[in-house]
Image (spheres, rainbow, N blue to C red):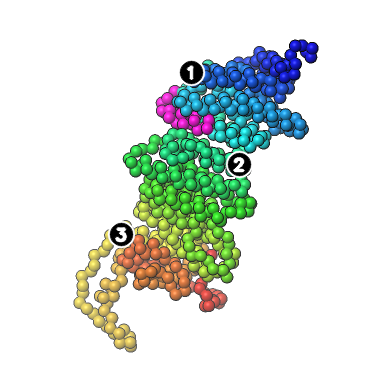
Amino acid sequence: GKGGPLKGAARGGACAFWATGLCMLTTQPTMEEPSLLPALPVVPLISGVQNLVGIVVAEVMTDLGSDSTAKVPEMVRVAALAVSSLTKAEAANPSREKAQLAMREALTSFLQQVTLPFCKGLVEIYEKGAQKVSHSVAETLRLQCQCLASASRLQLADEVRKEAVATLFSLGVAAGAVAGSVAGDAAEANAEEQIAPSDALPVSSASVVASSALVDASLDSGLLQQLVQHTPALKGKQLNTLRGCAAAELLCSQVVGLSNLDAGSSDLLVTLSKSSQDAAAQLAKVLAAGKTHEHQPAALHLLLAVAALSEHLDSGDRVAADGKASEFVSTVCASLSTACSALGKHLTEPMLAAVVRSCGALARLAGVPTTAGKAISEAMPPPMQTCLDGLGHFAAPLGSDIMGLLRGNLQRLWAHPGPSSGGAQWDALAQARARRLLCAATAAPLVSAEAADAALFAAMAQSAGVQTCLDFALLLFVARKSEQTPETTRKKKKPQRKRRNGEQGISVDEDMLEAMLPSQEALPESVIDDALGMLTAASAEDRYHCFGTLMQTLCCLASGLGEAEGSKTCWGLRLVPTDFLRAAGPEKAMVVLAAGLRVASRFLAEHGLPDDLDDLAFDGARPRATVA
């Protein structure tokens, strides 16, 4: 009582000590919350016992250093339960300003004396290779991680928040690295041992607890960026270790769940992209030396993190909030291109999928809309260039999943940046982008000879825009089919036959004409049938629009065969990419040209021209628009 020998803080500490003891007496073996705890004033309780609990924690860490399955005294768990109940009550029903100040002071002091030393001690134990902990340690760790998460939610001092988040992340990385080093058979054995409540829990439980606490902490972009910059496991050669992979995986999971986007999100994206570039370079060195990578590399997780954050930023309100959008896109794309180049043939399909996701999300941010009256740069937009780089380094057939992902981003990639109104110059540049992208996405070895059928190319054109590039998809289909057709032998030379062509008096050598043009037997008629089917399958409006563009494309192709600089006609359209001409070569290009003319001839013979064609308005002062 007040007349006793203990005064002030000493009396409060004694009361807290005895209150904790009473709570321990009422605790059941089921690890539930003590029934007496809700009836006690929590702030005086944790303030009174934190010094003693801190001493106990130091002793526990010493015991765990020699035996990772040592148990934690019940006093530590009861104190953590008290803090957990306090933070939950405060989140549900905030108290007045004075009470909040007292609560924050008590929570900060408890974190510094008990929670942080306990979690940091476990980090050291896990880094030494401990694979199991007792149930009491696991339960106490769960409560302490909740305390660390509350430091972010309750807006404690910045230094406390940063240290709490860094400790949680370090704990998740250390535990995740140990869990990843456990062999499959051992992991299954540990999972079976969890059935008995008296046995130790595997270290993977600590990784899950830390990851969940980070999610509950509601991290923002600034805190995540500090984690990337100040985590040793995400630097240099450490990226190829188990700790580096665990750190990248944990970071990726936090980025995927990131909801607090702000102006710093762009800085975080740049930092992640540079980290993925470093991770790719380190992975390439390991693989070039002939070493194997038994676990998912850090480069993959960091690329996935870049993709997730890019998709988070891909919405109108978030773009408006982050005015630096067009500035950081080039930096991010340059890092992704460098990563793809460093990996080269070691670029895997999941990595390429992450790059495609990033490029698709960033395409809309690559530039602001332009008008026809302003000069439009002919430079390739960074997201599309990065996508082309990724496709160029991938050296295997694309699976159905990534092909679907690529199809879903085709139109977004070539159409941005777009004009606020129509324009011939933008039309020409958009066509150049669309066709170059379609050419790269359907080239060998990305699309195998067996998969290169009319249905695939029609689907690609449908995704990219039927009126925009169905005609070129038709020619790409013919080009791929010509690779599968054996060259026909040249016919024996017949005696020269000359005739007069009408009244012009021009001598025509038919054998010479046959030698100049590709043989009509170079492609089977079934290929022409399939190509014609692609054109006629479009709606009537799209069909004739694509037919007109097909004739322009064939003119460009014929022009490109006679010019070293590529297929650019007098009206400025680049409807046949230089990459296509270079890959096909003159002979195959002649075959494609002849096949395109055969398709056009059959289309006119079977479908004719619209009856109202003469009534359509035509402006001969500017090029015909080819982009819908």
Furthest-right residue in this view: 3
Range of residues picked out in magenta? 170-189
Asked whether disc 2 touches disc 1, contact meaning CB atoms under 8 Å apart, the reply is no
The one nearer the camera, 98 or 411, is 98
Residue at image location 43% in from the left, 29% down from the top: 181
Query: Residues under labels 3 and 1: Cα distance?
Result: 71 Å
- Identify the residue under disc 2: 220
Q: Is residue 188 magenta?
A: yes
Q: Amino acid at mark 3?
A: Thr
The one nearer the camera, 212 or 188, is 212
Q: Secondary structure at mark 1?
A: loop
Q: Secondary structure at mark 2?
A: loop
Which of the 4 quarters of the picture holds residue 254? Answer: top right
Residue 485, numbered label: 3
Q: Which circle's residue, 2 or 3, is located before the other in the chain?
A: 2
Residue 603, numbered label: none
